[in-house]
């Protein structure tokens, strides 16, 4: 997966969390502290080809939380508490001398606030839920001498999403399948997006180890600024499109505490960094 695409958790994180169509029970919840990162020296062009770029990295410390206000209404917050965006030195291929020194920006990132409502009972054979995501532009833009370091996209977006799923047995293992579609309205000359995804989870060790595979896709309406007007080697570029696959493992240790680890890669991409992304975290169910 050398050329696999990163999952843009800063702007798209809610597609990777949120419990699918199953809201939290009243008074119950889930909280997770995780680290996500990617380092890349190439990016996908607007024609889906791979071009090189200055080595760039993003490290994000995220706090994700769900709480059930009722059995059908759940509130979700996905906050990027700390983000580090860096670029290495730009050196001459001829002399090896540094042309532009490397820089880094450390700041908070963007925050997603989500309201999810179950359209039928969570115990239904095929539960369905609708959610509203508000993407708050709390990150920093225009960092560094070149003004190309950032920890957010600088726009307030609103997304409507519908999730559906079902639980079943996969051989002797409990399992579930869920899917979603969403429309993301963006501001500040960013293009609107159509999003969709699939998720399959299997309980390998009863009540302890879950393995989850995901397919996530974003299709841009390309009705904002041209991609060249916003840094195409950034994870915050405009008119971004991708289809990615990922795998995550969640191991519960004891008393609702657990560990998680995951990675993601792509089968196609446009106007986005080209590299795998990784994540590790700790969580607590209550």
Image (cartoon, rainbow, N blue to C red):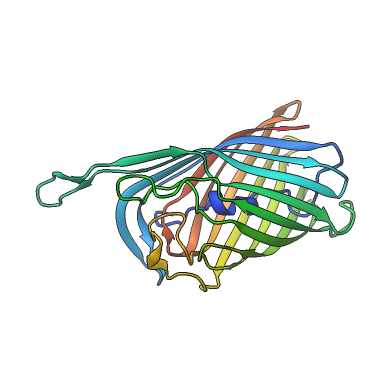
Residue sticking out furthest to the left: 95
In front of the other: 246 or 206 = 246
Is residue 248 or residue 31 the one in the foreground? Answer: 31
Left or right of 72: which side holds 102? left
Q: Could one spot residue 23 in this view of the protein?
A: yes
From the top left corner, tell me how far across and down residue 155 is, in percent: 54, 56
Dividing the picture into quadrants, the one containing residue 102 is: top left
Residue 245: quadrant of the picture: bottom right
Q: Nearer the viewer, residue 219 or 75?
A: 75
**Residue appearing at x 58%, y 63% in the figure:** 186
Q: Position of residue 246 (x, y in %)?
A: 56, 52
- Total marks drawn? 0
Q: Is residue 217 above or below residue 17?
A: below
Q: Is residue 113 left or right of residue 88?
A: right
The residue shown at (32%, 62%) is 51
Residue drawn 76% across the image and 45% down it: 75
Q: Quadrant where the C terminus lies?
A: top right
Q: Is residue 155 above or below residue 88?
A: below
Residue 170 seen anywhere in this rendered image of the structure? no
Q: Quadrant of the N terminus?
A: bottom left
On the picture, is 176 further left or further right than 70?
Answer: left
Indicate the position of residue 283 as horizontal and vertical percent values: 67, 33
Please name the residue shown 35% across and 50% down the image: 147
């Amino acid at each position: 997966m050398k050329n696999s695409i990163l999952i843009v958790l800063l702007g798209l994180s809610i597609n990777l969390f949120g419990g699918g169509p199953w809201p939290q029970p009243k008074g119950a919840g889930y909280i997770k502290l995780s680290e996500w990162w990617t380092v890349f020296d190439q990016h996908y062009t607007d024609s889906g080809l791979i071009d090189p770029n200055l080595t760039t990295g993003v490290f994000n410390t995220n706090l994700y939380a769900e709480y059930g206000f009722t059995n059908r209404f759940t509130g979700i917050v996905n906050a990027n508490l700390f983000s580090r965006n860096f670029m290495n030195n730009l050196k001459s291929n001829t002399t090896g001398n540094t042309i532009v020194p490397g820089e880094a920006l450390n700041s908070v990132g963007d925050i997603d606030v989500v309201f999810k409502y179950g359209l039928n009972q969570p115990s239904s054979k095929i539960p369905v839920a609708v959610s509203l995501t508000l993407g708050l532009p709390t990150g920093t833009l225009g960092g560094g001498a070149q003004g190309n370091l950032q920890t957010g996209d600088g726009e307030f977006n609103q997304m409507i999403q519908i999730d559906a799923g079902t639980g079943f047995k996969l051989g002797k293992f409990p399992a579930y399948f869920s899917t979603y579609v969403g429309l993301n309205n963006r501001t500040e000359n960013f293009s609107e997006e159509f999003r969709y995804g699939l998720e399959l989870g299997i309980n390998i060790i009863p009540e302890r180890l879950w393995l989850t595979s995901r397919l996530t896709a974003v299709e841009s309406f390309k009705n904002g600024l041209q991609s060249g007007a916003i840094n195409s080697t950034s994870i915050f570029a405009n008119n971004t499109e991708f289809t990615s696959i990922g795998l995550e493992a969640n191991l519960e240790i004891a008393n609702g505490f657990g560990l998680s680890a995951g990675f993601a890669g792509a089968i196609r991409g446009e106007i986005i960094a080209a590299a795998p992304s990784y994540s590790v975290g700790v969580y607590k169910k209550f």
